[in-house]
Image (spheres, rainbow, N blue to C red):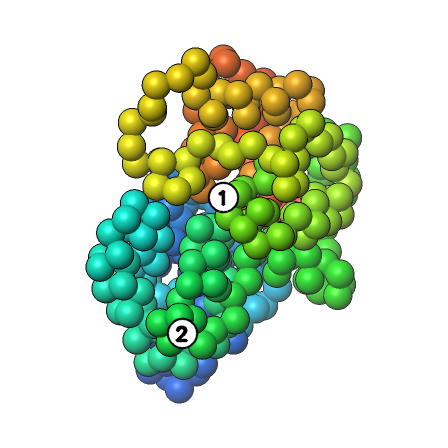
Amino acid sequence: MSEALSSKITVPVMADLFAKGEKPEYLFWVGCAGAFDNRYMKVAKAFASILNHLGTSYAVLGTEESCTGDPARRAGNEMLFQMQAMTNIEIFKMYEIKKVITICPHCFNILKNEYPDLGAEIEVLHYTEFLAEMIKTGKLKTDKSKLEGKTVTYHDPCYLGRANDIYEAPRFVINSLGLKLSEMHRNKSFALCCGAGGAQMFKDAEKGEKEIFIERTEEALETKADVIASSCPFCMTMLTDGLKYKNKEEEIKNLDIAELVAGALI
């Protein structure tokens, strides 16, 4: 996983630092999408570039990182989930990892809320929480002129919003960039799912009049925003597909919040 990230930027690997007797403060949990999905690799690189810019003490697991087991558990394969989870927990213990930052709400939710049942003792942050804190403390400064004037609508990921009540951090980050936020009529706890959660990403659509991702994309288009901001790899895939379905991919961009911040760094 480190190779995917390090084509243009230097990303420290946990095993290398640990061999030198160094213990980074944070583990950056890249996740399957950040490691293998070409589009979300750009998001992983963007967030890594922010961490480097801040001089954050962090590392990735590289080839030692495996799936959290979230899709397996959501699909009902409890045995596979526990096998994957226990393997990851042993790695956390081996490297004495105490703090984890994720760029995927699904990874965030399961690491934070379900891994403790299996013995994990870690503090887990979604990257929007981390960025909001860095901005509030003055450690992260951005140039508002780079993005000012653009209108953004933000799609709340289910596993970040309803599952973990994180609504303000991503909006605080967006507002700090000088962007105009135009909310969809269904937002925060009433936001419509992108259609990929609960392992739906990996199965064929069920019968119905309209797929969820199309309806959600239509709601985003109603805001007349220049950019649809997201903070989840599943959401990004579905919204990007929705824009293509509506032939709007050239007019309107779907960008992750990490990409917005990385593009405005001072």
Can you say whether 212 is above or below 117 in the image?
above
Question: Where in the figure is residue 176, as x and y percent of width and height?
Answer: 75, 47
Can you say whether 39 is above or below 224 in the image?
below
Q: Is residue 215 left or right of residue 185?
A: left
Can you say whether 112 is above or below 180 in the image?
below
Q: Which residue is mark 1?
A: 232
- C-alpha span from label 1 to label 2: 23 Å
N-terminal-most mark, 1 or 2? 2
Name the residue: 76% across, 34% down: 180
Q: Which residue is mark 2?
A: 120
**Secondary element at tag 2:** loop
Inspect the image, locate mark 2, and give the three-letter code of the amino acid beneath it.
Ala
> How many marks on residues?
2
Around disc 1, counting alpha carbons within 10 Å, would you say few (fewer than 14), some (14 to 19), or many (20 or more)? many
**CB under 8 Å between callouts 1 and 2?**
no
Question: Where in the figure is residue 150, as x and y percent of width and height?
Answer: 72, 30
Around disc 2, counting alpha carbons within 10 Å, would you say few (fewer than 14), some (14 to 19), or many (20 or more)? many
Kindly report which numbered mark, 1 or 2, lies closer to the viewer in this rendering: 2
Q: Is residue 114 visible?
A: yes
Inspect the image, locate mark 1, and give the three-letter code of the amino acid beneath it.
Cys
Judging depth in this view, the residue of 130 and 109 nearest the camera is 109
User: In the orientation shown, which residue stands out farthest toward the bottom?
Assistant: 21
Question: Where in the figure is residue 9, as x and y percent of width and height?
Answer: 45, 55
Name the residue: 69% across, 62% down: 133
Question: Where in the figure is residue 221, as x and y percent of width and height?
Answer: 62, 20
Q: Is residue 82 left or right of residue 174?
A: left
**Secondary element at tag 1:** loop
Name the residue: 57% across, 19% down: 218
Quarter placement of the N terminus: bottom left
Name the residue: 66% across, 25% down: 226
Q: Is residue 12 visible?
A: no
Judging depth in this view, the residue of 145 and 255 nearest the camera is 255
